[in-house]
Amino acid sequence: MGSSSIFIKKNKFPEGKANLLPSSKSISNRTLILNALSGNQSIVSNLSSARDTQLMMRLINSEDHVIDVMDAGTTMRFLTAYFAISGKKKILTGTTRMKQRPIALLVNALKEVGVTINYLENEGCPPHEIVEYHPGQINTISIPGNISSQYISALMMIAPLLPKGLTIQLKGKVGSRPYINMTAELMRKFGITCDFTGKVITIPNGKYEPVSYIVEADWSAASYWFAFTALAEIANITLPNISSESLQGDRVIVEIMENLGVMTRFENNQVHLSKSRHRTFLEWDFTDCPDLAQTVLPVCACKGIHGKFTGLESLRIKESDRIAALQTELGKIGAKITEDTTGIWTLVPSSGWTKSGIQIETYHDHRMAMGLAPLATLMDLEIKEPEVVNKSYPGFWEDMKAVGFEVGNL
């Protein structure tokens, strides 16, 4: 990453259409794995333009011995499982931050089902080498339910190819349940039996079938436009290719933002966003939608809405330590986020700020850039490392221009 910045002039009245809203990264990445597991015979259309998805497309069929996933956590986890049973020797590596992100729970589970994997630097973290796979007798594993659901999804998708299938028992609290449900539902569309009841996922041995599948728009990316609407004085924003029925857990942004002053209208496969009254207090459990925290907390901080939040634990091990990053950046406008009781976070909003504008650090994290960009409805902004948005929403800055913002480099 360079040391570039993007400058955004304050605009209290965003209006227009976000035409470059990407397709779902979560669905795209899963369907790429499922297509590969079905022998690359499926037709998957409207794949995400996100860098993570483009990277997955390039790497999944790569003949290279070393697979560099850069900063793409989903790609790292899914490809580790995929290559583990493909019979190919691979080394998986990534950025400095990726080498700090834990992968031991997934590696340990793969070892249990017969994969030989060695760590090449630090125990429990990438880079790691997949050496060989000898199908074992174990067809039941236990894994904590409160870790990244991507570990669980990675194991689910390879489960039908194991000789006896796989039963995954989730221990303790289950987080990001919608993402597990998404994986299960997509597997069913590709012809696999998959049962997820309570804390047990049961997947018998089976064969993936080729299908035709069209990927829907990304609700995580759509969430930022709800934040722009919430913080604007007047707003009228349209989002294309979004249906009210969705596999994505982040569709819950509609319900969250009802509390924060956004009215949502679904019409002709589009969403229309406009202003409504907001509450002064929000209590929310982000266990099933952790990626929405960076959308919601800045809105509360700026609108004088006090908050009480749970389910933020996984934010510590994302592209950045997102809790620390939010504390620092929202501190610049006088808001405070504190963990007064373990696992329970309170947000005390800003009581007003005197600066005409602030500089936002992004911590190599796409969601920090896009989650704080809506502050441009209230003040001029400088956002560092703006290219981070390419990870999930390459057209984000262009879409900001499309709804009326002046965006440029100095």
Image (cartoon, helix red, strand yellow):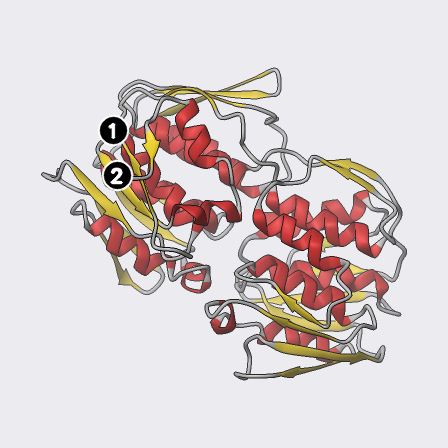
Crowding at mark 1 (Cα within 10 Å: few <14, some 14-19, many 20+)? many
- In this rendering, would 228 be left or right of 207? left
Mark 2 and 1 residues: CB-CB less than 8 Å, in contact? Answer: yes
- The residue tagged 2 is 381
Instruction: Point out the tag, 2 or 1, that comes first from the N-terminus.
Output: 1
Q: Looking at the image, which residue is at 73% across and 45% down?
A: 185
Residue flagged by tag 1: what amino acid is it? Lys
* Residue drawn at 27 percent across, 25 percent down: 11
Q: Nearer the viewer, residue 252 or 316?
A: 316
Residue 10 located left or right of residue 353: right
Give the residue drawn at x 26%, y 23%.
Answer: 12
Amino acid at the residue labelled 2: Leu
Residue 95 is situated, as x and y percent measured from the top left of the image, at 51, 67
Q: Which mark is residue 268?
A: none
Q: In the rendered view, does 117 fall on the left or right side of 334? A: right
Extreme front residue here?
410
Residue under the point 47% across and 70% down = 96
Q: CA distance from mark 2 to mark 1?
A: 7 Å
Q: Which residue is denoted by mark 1 in the rendering?
A: 10
